[in-house]
Image (cartoon, coloured by chain):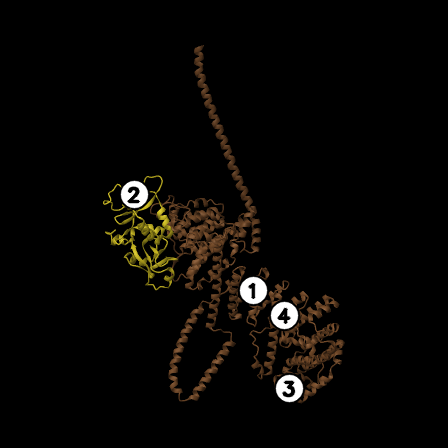
Chain colours: A yellow, B brown
């Protein structure tokens, strides 16, 4: 377990910024109320076996007691560095993203399942969409009841969505909560 | 027969009837007897010229039928002849043509110098006399003719008088009149002029065709030096024009057409039309000139407006329109109101002019806004709100286009067949072509003649109008943006004049809201972007929101939000879009709202459109708004809090999960979402963590002094306990606001006058007519007694309470002192007991 170096930090923050925009500040400065300390600590990012975790400082202190190879996970996993060196967000960070999401898409109940099986979001399945999405932005996918389902990358801007045919892809799938079942072992 | 000849000929007609044949009625005789003075003119008849006419005509006229024709046209040509004669008599005097229009040259004839007076008068009267005689002969509107005769004589007499005094002078009439007025008292002259105006006007209205000439006379009067007379002249001319202008546009005959031989009826008509047109033109020019003078401005504008309103189809509409639009944001209230009303009526009664004037007006307004750099009175944009568009036009046009395409196909098919049949017969073909050609021409003529418009034409006009409107709107928006950006770069001293900087923004936003369903989808992205920036949520950088919000008032920013939502709502059929940025704006605007400064209705409207009408909300956001609105309701007047509470109720009914706010313990954990603690200062409703809080405000509000607020608050707080509530509040925040602001006037009639005044100014004041205010005052007086009674009861109660408190305090005090005394006694006793034995021991 070690803090991220500069290159890794920029990689992580760039990814997160795509989804949260200016709310990234909230993620970093969020006070943590874990642990017995009277004054709230902060959250920080830690790298452990190529996986990036979002951990409160008090937890980090206590985790130092455990050997590195024995430590499986701590805090919330945010993403992982691939063998090629690029950073991927994983589904565990969904809660963090959903809270601070800048761009959101709500799915109709009929198309929820399709998304949870790992498919892209089509225009026909779109219940609502935030205004002002630009193609390439990170989008958090919600059900109509405001349950976060996953996230992805916008394929079209909101304006273009109006004119699209219902079979066009709006959001490219990146991760969904179905992964907890489908790829349980990898997580 | 050439045209010239015809004009000269007719006057010679009457003498055909010899003097003996002319029936002189008793009335005529009496008239002559009564007016001996005039008879002198008759005695001075230029018999020579008359006989000349008679002799000349005698050999020309032999056909009875033709003479009948001539007689019918006699009147018109007679006038012309008269004119011609007048000119023949004295060319010299015809020279100083003074009027603006060249055709008015014979106007100078009546003012001929004295030498030719007799001859001219003689001829004139002779004509008239013969005229009268002829009339009686034909038994046509005799009385009217006589009236006219009388009038002309009077005029002539008057003019003769004037001219006699002035002598031979080639000065404009104004000067002549000025000199005359030295001798005649001014009042007398004015009175006479007024009478003359009235006579001329009524005569014109009775029979415009025959009296068309007197238009010029009236025009002359309107140029009078005296202000009152001139105004009267303008006004009477307006009345006349309004009445006699035909329902079509006059097209003057071309040179070629004038050369063509036409029937007399047509010629008469042409003369009438051309005279009318020239007089109208002169009148308009006069108006335009007078418009610049301060003293005449209102009258001139009123005339122009009425004309434009009454005859928008007629010639010279463009100049009228230009004048009206030019004054649409005049600093003079009366003028501006007039112009605006005219333009509005122009927009609403499109049938009168077939929509062309609308297009022109809108384009002119757009141009005007452009030229003046958006610094105009709001009224000038508000007029656009009265425009209406036919949305079905597009569809019908589409279907008709389809039909046309089909027809074309059919035609093509036919054409392919036709050649084989027709090639043999070229003659037949050419004839057919000719036929179709003429048919087309007839069709075109028919189209030109009827007012029924082509659908395509109307569509074109609508789209032109629309593009002009949106050009204006976008220009205003952009201008506002630029001015804001420019100003915020400078020093921020000018914050006081912030709202005054863009007067057109509010009506422009209203307009966009109204016509939002007609905006092209391609524009929408830009429009929303602009609105977002104006509302204060610039998406580009964090610094810009503050920059903009500093320069726009809360009301304007609220309006931006409202418009954005309207635009989105009207285009909802395509995609359900969530305007998150605007919610963030509203969330922060609620905090900035100040009851005295900002418009409560706008806030209520925003609450309705953004929070009540929208179908779904995030739970977090809804909770945040509920919390903030409840807090808001605590600190503002009852009308605002009513609006806020109605919204809160609405939100709570829709979002069942948010009812957690009503539970007693602060939620926390998974219920409250990822943010575990309520952050009242968060700018984003999604991050405020409102679900972790409790709506304690409702408890306070249920003790609100206003019964409506308190009952509503308590009903909200029991919303969750009342199971499966089917009752849906159908009161919108707006209605609630209006109602309670009305009630408020009743509620505290005199308690706080300053406050009440403020409320009036801000809230319903401007929209409410004054009569209702007085009504309110009356009813408030009635209520005063009741309020007094209640107050006295209340104070009595309070007094009693304090009294009992005091008594209770005394009671406690006395009991405590009693206790103390008892203790003291006991102690004393024990002391005594203790001391006694000692004493005894000592003893």
Give the residue at mark 4. Answer: B237
Distance from the alpha carbon under mark 4 to that under mark 1: 23 Å
Horizontal and vertical percent position of residue B631: 44, 47
Residue B356 horizontal side relative to residue B659, left or right: right
Q: Which dot marks residue B67?
A: 3
Q: Is residue B731 visible?
A: no
Name the secondary structure under disc 1.
helix
Q: Is residue A52 above or below residue B174?
A: above
The image quarter containing residue B323 is: bottom right
Q: Chain of mark 1?
A: B
Mark 1 or 2: the one toward you? 2
- Whichever of callouts 4 and 1 sits on the residue coming sooner in the sequence is 4
Mark 2 or 4: the one toward you? 2
Q: Is residue B675 above or below residue B10?
A: above
The image quarter containing residue B395 is: bottom left
Q: Is residue B782 above or below residue B7?
A: above
- Whichever of callouts 3 and 1 sits on the residue coming sooner in the sequence is 3
Mark 1 Cα shell of 10 Å, populated few (<14), some (14-19), many (≥20)? some
Horizontal and vertical percent position of residue B310: 57, 69
Give the residue at mark 1. Answer: B326
Q: Chain of mark 2?
A: A
Distance from the alpha carbon under mark 1 to that under mark 2: 75 Å
Q: Which dot marks residue A60?
A: 2
């Amino acid at each position: 377990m070690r803090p991220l170096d500069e290159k890794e930090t920029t990689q992580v923050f760039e990814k997160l910024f795509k989804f949260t925009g200016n709310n990234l500040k909230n993620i970093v400065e969020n006070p943590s109320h874990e642990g017995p300390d009277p004054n709230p600590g902060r959250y920080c990012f830690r790298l452990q076996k190529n996986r990036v975790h979002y951990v409160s400082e008090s937890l980090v202190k206590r985790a130092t007691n455990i050997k590195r190879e024995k430590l499986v996970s701590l805090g919330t996993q945010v993403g992982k560095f691939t063998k090629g060196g690029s950073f991927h967000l994983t589904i565990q960070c969904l809660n963090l993203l959903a809270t601070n999401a800048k761009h959101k898409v709500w799915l109709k109940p009929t198309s929820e399942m399709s998304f949870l099986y790992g498919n892209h979001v089509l225009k026909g399945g779109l219940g609502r969409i935030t205004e002002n999405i630009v193609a390439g932005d990170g989008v958090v996918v919600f059900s109509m009841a405001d349950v976060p389902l996953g996230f992805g990358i916008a394929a079209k801007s909101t304006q273009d969505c109006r004119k699209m045919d219902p079979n066009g892809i709006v959001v490219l799938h990146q991760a969904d909560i179905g992964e907890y079942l489908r790829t349980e072992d990898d997580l | 027969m050439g045209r010239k000849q015809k004009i000269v000929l007719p006057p010679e007609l009457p003498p055909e009837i010899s003097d003996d044949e002319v029936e002189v009625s008793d009335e005529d005789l009496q008239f002559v007897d009564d007016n001996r003075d005039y008879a002198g003119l008759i005695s001075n008849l230029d018999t020579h010229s008359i006989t000349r006419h008679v002799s000349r005509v005698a050999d020309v006229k032999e056909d009875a039928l033709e003479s009948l024709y001539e007689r019918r046209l006699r009147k018109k040509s007679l006038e012309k002849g008269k004119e011609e004669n007048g000119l023949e008599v004295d060319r010299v005097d015809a020279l100083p043509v003074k009027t603006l229009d060249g055709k008015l040259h014979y106007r100078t004839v009546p003012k001929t110098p004295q030498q030719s007076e007799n001859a001219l008068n003689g001829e004139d009267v002779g004509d008239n006399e013969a005229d009268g005689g002829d009339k009686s002969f034909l038994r046509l509107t005799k009385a009217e003719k006589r009236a006219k005769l009388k009038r002309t004589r009077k005029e002539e007499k008057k003019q003769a008088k004037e001219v006699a005094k002035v002598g031979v002078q080639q000065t404009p009439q104004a000067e002549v009149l000025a000199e005359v007025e030295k001798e005649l008292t001014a009042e007398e002259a004015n009175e006479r002029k007024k009478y003359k105006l009235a006579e001329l006007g009524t005569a014109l209205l009775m029979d415009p065709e025959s009296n068309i000439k007197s238009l010029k006379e009236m025009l002359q009067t309107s140029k009078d030096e005296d202000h009152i007379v001139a105004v009267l002249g303008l006004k009477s001319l307006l009345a006349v024009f309004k009445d006699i202008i035909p329902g079509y546009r006059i097209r003057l005959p071309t040179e070629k057409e004038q050369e063509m031989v036409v029937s007399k009826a047509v010629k008469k008509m042409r003369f009438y039309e051309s005279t009318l047109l020239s007089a109208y033109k002169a009148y308009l020019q006069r108006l335009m000139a007078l418009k610049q003078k301060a003293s005449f401005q209102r009258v001139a504008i009123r005339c122009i407006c009425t004309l434009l309103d009454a005859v928008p189809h007629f010639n010279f509409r463009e100049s009228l329109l230009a004048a009206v639009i030019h004054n649409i944001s005049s600093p003079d209230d009366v003028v501006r109101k007039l112009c605006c009303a005219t333009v509005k009526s122009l927009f609403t009664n499109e049938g009168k002019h077939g929509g062309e004037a609308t297009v022109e007006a809108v384009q002119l307004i757009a141009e005007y806004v452009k030229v003046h750099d958006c610094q105009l009175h709001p009224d000038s944009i508000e007029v656009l709100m009265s425009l209406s568009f036919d949305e079905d036009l597009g569809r019908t046009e589409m279907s008709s286009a389809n039909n046309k395409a089909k027809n074309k196909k059919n035609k093509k098919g036919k054409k392919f067949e036709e050649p084989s049949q027709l090639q043999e017969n070229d003659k037949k073909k050419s004839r057919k072509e000719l036929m179709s050609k003429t048919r087309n021409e007839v069709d075109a003529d028919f189209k030109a003649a009827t007012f029924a418009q082509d659908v395509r034409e109307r569509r074109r006009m609508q789209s032109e109008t629309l593009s002009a409107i949106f050009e204006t709107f976008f220009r205003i928006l952009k201008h506002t943006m630029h001015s804001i950006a420019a100003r915020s770069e400078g020093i921020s001293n000018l914050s006081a004049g912030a709202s005054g900087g863009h007067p057109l923004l509010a009506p422009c936003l209203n307009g966009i809201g109204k016509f939002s369903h007609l905006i092209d989808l391609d524009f929408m992205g830009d429009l929303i972007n602009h609105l977002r920036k104006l509302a204060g949520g610039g998406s580009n950088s964090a610094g810009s929101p503050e920059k903009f919000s500093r320069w726009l008032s809360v009301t304007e920013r609220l309006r931006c939000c409202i418009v954005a939502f309207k635009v989105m709502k009207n285009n909802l059929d395509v995609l359900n879009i969530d305007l998150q940025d605007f919610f963030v704006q509203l969330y922060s605007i609620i905090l900035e709202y100040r009851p005295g400064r900002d418009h409560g209705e706008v806030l209520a409207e925003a609450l309705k459109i953004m929070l009540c009408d929208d179908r779904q909300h995030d739970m977090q956001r809804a909770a945040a708004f509920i919390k903030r609105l409840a807090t808001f309701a605590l600190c503002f007047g009852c009308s605002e809090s009513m609006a806020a509470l109605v919204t809160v109720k609405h939100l709570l009914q829709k979002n069942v999960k948010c009812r957690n706010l009503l539970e007693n313990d602060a939620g926390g954990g998974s219920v409250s979402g990822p943010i575990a603690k309520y952050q009242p200062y968060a700018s984003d409703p999604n991050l405020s963590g409102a679900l972790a809080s409790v709506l304690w405000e409702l408890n306070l509000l249920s003790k609100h002094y206003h019964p409506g607020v308190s009952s509503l608050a308590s009903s909200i707080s029991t919303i969750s306990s009342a199971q499966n509530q089917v009752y849906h509040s159908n009161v919108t925040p707006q209605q609630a606001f209006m109602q309670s602001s009305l009630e408020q006037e009743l509620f505290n009639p005199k308690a706080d006058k300053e406050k009440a005044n403020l409320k009036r100014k801000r809230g319903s004041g401007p929209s409410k007519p004054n009569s209702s205010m007085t009504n309110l005052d009356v009813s408030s007086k009635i209520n005063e007694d009741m309020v007094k009674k209640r107050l006295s009861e209340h104070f009595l109660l309070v007094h009693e309470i304090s009294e009992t408190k005091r008594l209770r305090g005394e009671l406690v005090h006395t009991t405590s002192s009693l206790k103390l005394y008892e203790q003291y006694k006991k102690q004393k006793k024990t002391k005594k007991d203790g001391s006694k034995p000692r004493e005894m021991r000592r003893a």
